[in-house]
Amino acid sequence: MKFITRKRLIEAGVLIVVAIVLTFTLDYYMSALRKAPEPENVYEPEPRMEYGIVVDSFYIVKDVISPGENLSAILNKYGVGPLAIEQLARKSAGIFDVRRIRSGNKYTVLCTNDSLKRAEYFIYEHSPTQYVVFETGDSLHIHTGEKEVQVKLRSASGTITSSLWNAMTDAGASPNLTVSLSEIYAWSIDFYAIQPGDNFTVFYEELQVEGEQIGLGNIISARFFHGGKDNFAFRFVQDGTADYFDDKGQSLRKAFLKAPLKFSRISSRFSNSRLHPVLRIRRPHHGVDYAAPKGTPVHSVGSGTVTDVRYAGGAGRMVKIKHNATYSTAYLHLSGYGPGIKSGARVRQGQVIGYVGSSGLSTGPHLDFRFYKNGTPVDPLKVESPPALPVKKELMDSFNLYRLSLTRQLDSLNMPVKQTVMPL
């Protein structure tokens, strides 16, 4: 009995040892398993979003509105019934007028990814940045949205051979850049007097949506060589308002614009003895004639009050504006008047006050522009216009640092150079 008991005790001891070993081994492997690192670099694609909608599960149709096509015609093609279309049109009231859907604009249809290809969403882009979403599935809803606009910095440079417009075109720049640049320098450069060999460099913002240019942002800085000198323009913000200043911190904005037309040519200058083209006699011509097509907008060169609007015999349709106690201007031979232009009306600088015509004694469409100082006619091309407020003294250090940085950028293009447009 003692022998058997002892033997059993030994066997029991062995079993206990084995159990302990197995327990620790199992615990070790379970612990190792728990601590095993997650697989690295597992690719999980981001869901594809368009117009704020996850589109991975849809069959996508992108097209443009055809002439005569409307909401009903498009949705009918993708299985949306007339009752649902009518409800969508009603629900869209106050959000988007479906009658404003225009041919040539882009649209997207998100369809079920099956044999039916039924529309679940219809998205209409009514501008490069704005769109309206029609939910056409189980529930009918309409909402609007806007695309993200990216701002890219660009530069353009060129040399004048005939006109700023042609130089910009040769450089591959947008015509809108020509207009923006001429507006910045409207007080300091007469663009009817620029000469071959004048040159320019400009840094500006280009607005893009989904990599496609949709327009221009601000001009950041510019240099225009004209009249034997560099004319600088730097966009700078003070008191929360952005304006353009020269390299000395003086505002480019002045009391009077250089000319009342944006693009034209001078056909006759101020003179005390000019051969009248109709009467064929010599008489004073106390104005500057700008040749331009009939209907070209005429802008007030300064803010003021309209004192006279009438048909004035040989002067034709005429507008007179009093700017202050000293200066007034007159605009002759108009074909018509701008909106709201009547005696006593207040006008702002740059406002359209009329349109080029050939009324009165005239051989063709042009504007006869006149400038008066204390009631006496003066040559509009020689009027010295006082500037607006300069950069404040306390901001000059900041302005100069900013100006130096932008000037280095402008100098880096080493003008004059071949016409170019390039990203920064």
Image: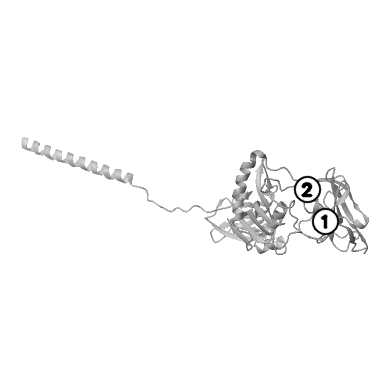
Tell which residue pokes out farthest to the front in this image.
Answer: 228
Q: Label 2 amino acid?
A: Ser
Tell which residue pokes out farthest to the top in this image.
Answer: 2
Residue 20, x across and y down, in percent: 21, 40
Q: Which residue is drawn at 73% across and 61% down?
A: 195
SS label for mark 2: loop
Residue 353, x across and y down, in percent: 82, 51
Q: Of label 1 and label 2, which has the lower sequence position?
A: 1
SS label for mark 1: strand
Within 10 angstroms of label 1, few (less than 14), some, or many (20 or more) residues?
many
Residue 275, x across and y down, in percent: 90, 62
Q: In this view, does 99 lie to the left or right of 1?
A: right
Q: Quadrant of the C terminus?
A: bottom right
Numbered circle sitting on residue 385: 2
Numbered circle sitting on residue 121: none
Q: Tell me the CA gap for discs 1 and 2.
A: 24 Å
Instruction: Assess whether mark 2 and mark 1 are in contact (beta carbons under 8 angstroms).
Output: no
Q: Which of 18 and 90 is in front in this view?
A: 18
Within 10 angstroms of label 2, few (less than 14), some, or many (20 or more) residues?
some
Q: In which quarter of the image is residue 104?
A: bottom right
Q: Label 1 amino acid?
A: Tyr
Q: Is residue 83 above or below residue 386?
A: below
Q: Quadrant of residue 68?
A: bottom right
Residue 25, x across and y down, in percent: 24, 44
Q: In which quarter of the image is residue 268?
A: bottom right
Q: Which of 205 and 144 is in front in this view?
A: 205
Mark 1 = which residue?
355
Residue 136 visible somewhere in the drawing:
no
Residue 423 visible somewhere in the drawing:
yes
Q: Nearer the viewer, residue 35 or 363?
A: 363
Marks 1, 2: nearer the viewer: 2
Q: In which quarter of the image is the N terminus?
A: top left
